[in-house]
Image (cartoon, grey):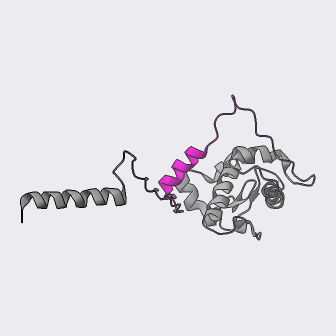
């Protein structure tokens, strides 16, 4: 075949392709959409060291520069209202239903007395301690891991902070947070 004829045929084919499909203009191709990636959330049971770190993280900022949190309107018959601000400082949510129940628990367990001590039948000074009556037999190992001595449970903040960790930890695991106090959700 004649090389000039071959070049003419090739050029003719190129021109017909340009006419049919259009010229390669300066427009950039459409970008392909990027899929949205959502973060995966998992609940993990904390080691004792992580629990101590969590307590430090969740400890409130000194209130000298902050105004106290205003408690939501609780029921007029909510028990132990004098401890609700401490409960909020200890991490409990500012939620009427939760604070009403917490007040009920404090009244039932300790008559709102932070130094309440249920006598022990095994020679210990107390079986249950403080406002929410944390049970030594059920939780003393956890208290030790958190650096809480039994007598520390007489401090209202420590007692309510620990109760919040117990309640919120159960809720995070899909369990009823009120069960340790024999309440149903």
Which range of residues does the magenta coloring cover?
A: 46-70
Identify whether 172 is placed above or below 158: below
Instruction: From the viewer's side, name the closer residue of 82 and 168.
Output: 168
State how many labels appear: 0
Q: In which quarter of the image is residue 13?
A: bottom left
Is residue 56 inside the magenta stretch?
Answer: yes
Residue 99 in the image, given as x and y percentages of width and height? 80, 54
- Left or right, residue 51 beside residue 163: left
* Quadrant (top left/top right/bottom left/bottom right) for the C terminus: bottom right
Residue found at the far left of this picture: 2
Is residue 88 inside the magenta stretch?
Answer: no
Residue 26 in the image, given as x and y percentages of width and height? 37, 44
- Left or right, residue 183 beside residue 166: right
Residue found at the far top of this picture: 65
- Residue at x 59% of width, y 60% of height: 140
- Left or right, residue 156 beside residue 18: right
Instruction: From the viewer's side, name the closer residue of 149 and 9.
Output: 9
- Residue at x 80% of width, y 40% of height: 70
* Quadrant (top left/top right/bottom left/bottom right) for the N terminus: bottom left
Identify whether 51 is placed above or below 139: above
Instruction: From the viewer's side, name the closer residue of 142 and 178.
Output: 178
- Residue at x 87% of width, y 51% of height: 74
- Residue at x 61% of width, y 43% of height: 59
């Amino acid at each position: 075949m004649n090389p000039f004829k071959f070049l003419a045929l090739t050029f003719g084919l190129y021109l017909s392709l340009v006419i049919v499909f259009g010229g390669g203009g300066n427009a950039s191709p459409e970008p392909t959409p990027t899929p949205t990636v959502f973060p995966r959330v998992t609940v993990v049971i904390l080691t004792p060291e992580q629990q101590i770190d969590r307590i430090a993280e969740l400890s409130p900022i000194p209130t000298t520069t902050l105004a106290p949190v205003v408690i939501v309107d609780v029921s007029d018959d909510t028990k132990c209202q004098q401890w609700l601000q401490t409960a909020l400082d200890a991490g409990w949510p500012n939620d009427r239903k939760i604070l009403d129940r917490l007040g009920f628990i404090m009244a039932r367990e300790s008559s709102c007395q932070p130094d309440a001590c249920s006598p022990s039948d095994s020679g210990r000074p107390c079986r249950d301690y403080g406002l929410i009556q944390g049970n030594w037999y059920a939780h003393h190992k956890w208290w030790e891991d958190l650096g809480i001595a039994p007598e520390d449970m007489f401090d209202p903040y420590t007692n309510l902070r620990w109760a919040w960790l117990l309640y919120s930890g159960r809720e995070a695991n899909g369990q009823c947070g009120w069960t340790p106090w024999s309440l149903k959700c």
